[in-house]
Image (cartoon, grey):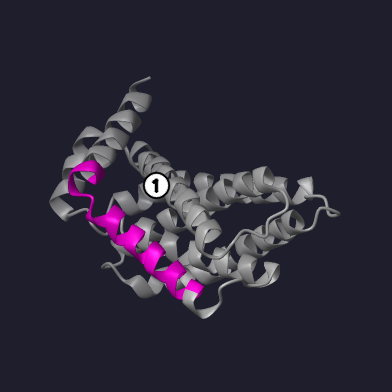
Amino acid sequence: MRSLNHIYSLLKKDLLLELRQQYNFYGVLLYIVATIFVLYLAIEEPEPKVWNGLFWVIQLFICINAVAKSFLQESRHRMLYFYSIAGPRDFVLAKLLFNSLLMLVMSLLSLLLFSLFLTNPVQKTGSFIGLVMLGGWSLSLVFTFLAAIAAKAQQNAAIMAILGFPIIIPQLLLLMRLSNAVFDPALTIPSDTILLLIAMDLMVILLAVILFPFLWKD
């Protein structure tokens, strides 16, 4: 119960800071609008496969801009304060939860703008919305975990690229495989692939809970 109170307090703190500052949210929103508008000027009605590939590439960069800075903006003095009032597992779980919520909002906004500017070739809209939410959650978990490592390595962004590439590629391949099925009504969405993606997400959460306490001590 005490752990849940810590997670809730830390999550509330991040939400209040985001609502008060808002520069991160509006900065990412500007990035989404500008990128999709440029795509609209370049290719007004892309083919379904091109539309799908562009969408997930944009999602990847949205996640990097929205989520990866979550640990880098925490100062050393603030981290010492958190160290005195909460445990490492509570802290990292609160960050994972906050970034998941943030990425879900950004993913749905990008899907809306994609549909408005680049039309919407999706045949199974409900399934694709669920897949977008699952994909946004998956990407946020990975980059939150990588941001925690990078923040403890003198804020070295290169570490995120080196560690993130072999981790994020399998997730993107699974998301592409799943999303291909929503563009063709004759295809069914493979449930085993969804379960595999969820299993990978749970593994990332487990790794964060196990490994972050060692980073926390530094």
Which secondary structure class fits the magenta region best? helix
Q: Position of residue 214 (x, y in %)?
A: 37, 51
> The residue under label 1 is which amino acid type?
Leu
Crowding at label 1, few (<14), some or many (≥20) Cα neighbours within 10 Å? Answer: many
**Magenta residues, as a range?**
18-40
Q: Name the residue: 28% across, 36% down.
A: 10
Residue sticking out furthest to the left: 77
Q: How many discs appear?
A: 1
Q: Residue at x 42, y 40 (%)?
A: 97
On whether residue 174 falls in the magenta region, the answer is: no
Quarter-of-image position of residue 89: top left
Q: Quadrant of the N terminus?
A: top left
Out of 174 and 52, give the one closest to the viewer: 52
State the SS at label 1: helix
Q: Nearer the viewer, residue 109 or 103?
A: 109
Q: Position of residue 113 (x, y in %)?
A: 48, 57
